[in-house]
Image (cartoon, helix red, strand yellow):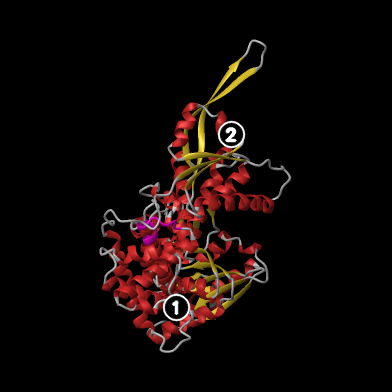
């Protein structure tokens, strides 16, 4: 179990007695905030594995730690008063946790500042849970302790559980009570700072997602509590805000992961963007609000529509976050996807994508009068596509082809880890990637080819009805709505044993997805999926990853009670609705 550690700096002043309070807590009357915080944190319940560290300068040790005869002169009155040192007070509390005095320098210069830093850092152990008191820290010491605590979060995986300040200056003289101020938000703000910097600089969303989930889970837990008193703490707007934020961060995580791991089909038709477009302008998490605009700004280049632009802009995003190999991979596949779109080639057909890629290379060789150097092919589709690309003057010029060749070489360089003759040095590689991305982004705005033959004729559209309701029994309204998606084909939805486990459901889904993808090679497919919920979810999710649109049918239910007490139920079709 991790140690609990209380750290406090003892000052040199003459402290008057008062009671310290926080919410319903009221301490014993004391001169020392340390005694009040030991009571507040219930350190008496700690174990002998835990620690209380009191940081002392030489002067603080004689002035307030170990006082001879328990007497001290009040410099305002000039009289000596009973004044027990903090050492004796803590001893009288009989704490199970061991109390240790830690000598520190006065901090008069930079050398002493670093001595203090190293002294405090070295008393911490991996995984400690810190309770920090900043009340009597002198000059810059509160800032030093605060920064050190956050440094230790990363270096020793410590958890800062509390940062407190005894505000004697706000003393209520009538009751002789001073408030304990919670300064933990300062540490949490630094957590948000690091998380924001990680996302904006490196594209790492894990920190943001973790911090958001800590906040939203607490709100949603109270909102769904069986205790009415806890439910009343959360109004409807706060609950809805927490739900929207949870959806937003989940969508952001999925989309960023798609770019990091080069999941081209997910980026090509990023359904997760829909989770981010409904985000409110502000949230109940104050440190997050200034960051929201920057997050949204970083996503403005992407569109929920199916387009190669998303893949090419993902390359720019990856480059800006220092993910250079992912940038090259996404750019290469994005350009291939662009040509597939331009010439009517299925973007998820790996064989035809390879044909398109080779056709671009051969078109380049033809322009340079070196076509004879390229391997000849008897594939008519391939040679036809070479002719089309080579004659596409809007795109295929010397500038584009030189950058495309450079992109090919960079991808090979990365994939072989530079284990080749004359590998490109990192700085030049970075510069070349940047130039290639800029050049490829420019082709997104070129006109489509005029009256140009495509590699394939316009593909027929097919509407697959994967359900237990044959289209022959559909209403005229439903059949007409289906025809808008193409020719209708029935595919019976299987009966699912209620005892089947998740792995079996996934296997069944794979069987149907494979069959549908085979049909999608030659047709523009939309799938109507209605059936057992687990299998429906699996099929829809997997088809969406391949860029296949899935829809459900919606209907009105009309119930009529009959004279014999039975009920007549009719469903009236209304529309098809996309799974998003």
Closest to the observer, 269 or 251: 269
Q: Position of residue 136 (x, y in %)?
A: 44, 70
- In the picture provided, is 122 more to the left or to the right than 112? right
Place of residue 157 in the rendered image (x, y in percent of width and height, measured from the top left)? 55, 71
Judging by the rendered image, the residue that carries numbered circle 1 is 412
User: Which quarter of the rendering shows the N terminus?
Assistant: bottom right
Q: Is residue 343 magenta?
A: yes
Distance from disc 2 to disc 1, alpha carbons, whole Å, reads: 50 Å
Write down the region rendered in magenta: 338-347
- Between label 2 and label 1, give the one nearer the viewer: 2
The residue wearing badge 2 is: 470
Residue 529: % across, % down:
55, 41
Q: Quadrant of residue 565?
A: top right
Q: Is residue 166 above or below residue 241?
A: below
Query: Which residue is rendered at x = 54% and y = 47% of the image?
Result: 540
Residue 306, numbered circle: none
Secondary structure type for disc 2:
loop
Of residue 519 and residue 208, the one placed in the foreground of this image is: 519
Q: Quadrant of residue 567?
A: top right
């Amino acid at each position: 179990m991790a140690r609990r550690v209380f750290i406090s700096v003892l000052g040199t002043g003459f402290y008057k007695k008062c009671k310290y309070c926080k919410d319903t807590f009221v301490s014993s009357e004391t001169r020392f905030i340390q005694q009040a915080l030991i009571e507040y944190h219930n350190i008496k319940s700690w174990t002998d594995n835990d620690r209380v560290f009191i940081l002392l300068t030489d002067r603080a040790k004689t002035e307030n730690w170990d006082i001879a005869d328990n007497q001290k002169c009040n410099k305002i009155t000039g009289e000596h008063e009973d004044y027990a040192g903090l050492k004796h007070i803590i001893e009288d509390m009989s704490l199970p946790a061991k109390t240790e005095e830690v000598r520190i320098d006065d901090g008069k210069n930079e050398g002493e500042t670093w001595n203090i830093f190293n002294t405090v850092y070295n008393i911490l152990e991996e995984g400690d849970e810190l309770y920090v008191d900043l009340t009597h820290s002198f000059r810059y010491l509160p800032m030093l302790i605060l920064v050190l605590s956050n440094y230790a979060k990363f270096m020793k995986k410590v958890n800062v559980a509390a940062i407190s300040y005894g505000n004697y200056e706000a003393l209520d003289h009538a009751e002789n009570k001073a408030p304990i101020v919670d300064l933990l938000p300062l540490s949490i703000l630094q957590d948000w700072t690091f998380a924001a910097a990680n996302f904006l600089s490196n594209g790492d969303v894990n920190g943001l997602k973790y911090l958001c989930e800590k906040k939203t889970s607490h709100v949603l837990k109270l909102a769904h509590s069986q205790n009415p008193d806890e439910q009343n703490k959360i109004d409807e707007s706060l609950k809805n805000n927490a739900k929207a934020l949870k959806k937003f961060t989940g969508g952001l995580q999925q989309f960023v992961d798609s770019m990091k791991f080069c999941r081209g089909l997910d980026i090509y038709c990023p359904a997760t963007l829909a989770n981010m477009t409904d985000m409110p302008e502000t949230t109940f998490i104050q440190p997050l609000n200034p960051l929201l605009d920057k997050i949204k700004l970083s996503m403005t280049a992407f569109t929920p529509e199916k387009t190669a632009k998303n893949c090419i802009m993902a390359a720019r995003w990856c480059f800006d976050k220092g993910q250079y190999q992912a940038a090259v991979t996404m750019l290469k596949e994005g350009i291939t996807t662009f040509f597939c779109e331009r010439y009517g080639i299925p973007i998820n057909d790996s064989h035809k994508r390879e044909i398109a890629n080779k056709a671009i290379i051969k078109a380049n060789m033809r322009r340079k009068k070196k076509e004879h150097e390229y391997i000849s092919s008897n594939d008519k589709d391939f040679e036809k596509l070479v002719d089309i690309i080579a004659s596409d003057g809007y795109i295929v010029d010397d500038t584009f082809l030189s950058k495309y060749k450079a992109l090919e070489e960079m991808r090979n360089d990365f994939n072989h880890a530079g284990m080749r003759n004359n590998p490109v040095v990192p700085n030049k590689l970075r510069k070349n990637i940047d130039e290639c991305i800029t050049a490829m982004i420019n082709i997104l705005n070129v006109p489509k080819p005029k009256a140009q033959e495509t590699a394939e004729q316009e593909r027929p559209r097919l509407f697959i009805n994967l359900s237990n309701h044959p289209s022959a029994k559909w209403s005229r309204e439903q059949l007409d709505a289906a025809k808008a998606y193409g020719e209708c084909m029935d595919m019976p939805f299987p009966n699912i044993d209620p005892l089947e486990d998740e792995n079996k459901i996934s296997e069944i889904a794979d069987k149907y997805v494979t069959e549908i993808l085979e049909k999608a090679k030659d047709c523009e497919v939309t799938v109507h999926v209605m059936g057992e919920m687990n299998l429906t979810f699996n099929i829809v999710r997997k088809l969406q990853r391949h860029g296949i649109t899935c829809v459900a049918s919606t209907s009105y239910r009309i119930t009529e009670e009959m004279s014999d007490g039975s009920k007549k139920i009719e469903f009236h079709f209304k529309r098809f609705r996309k799974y998003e």
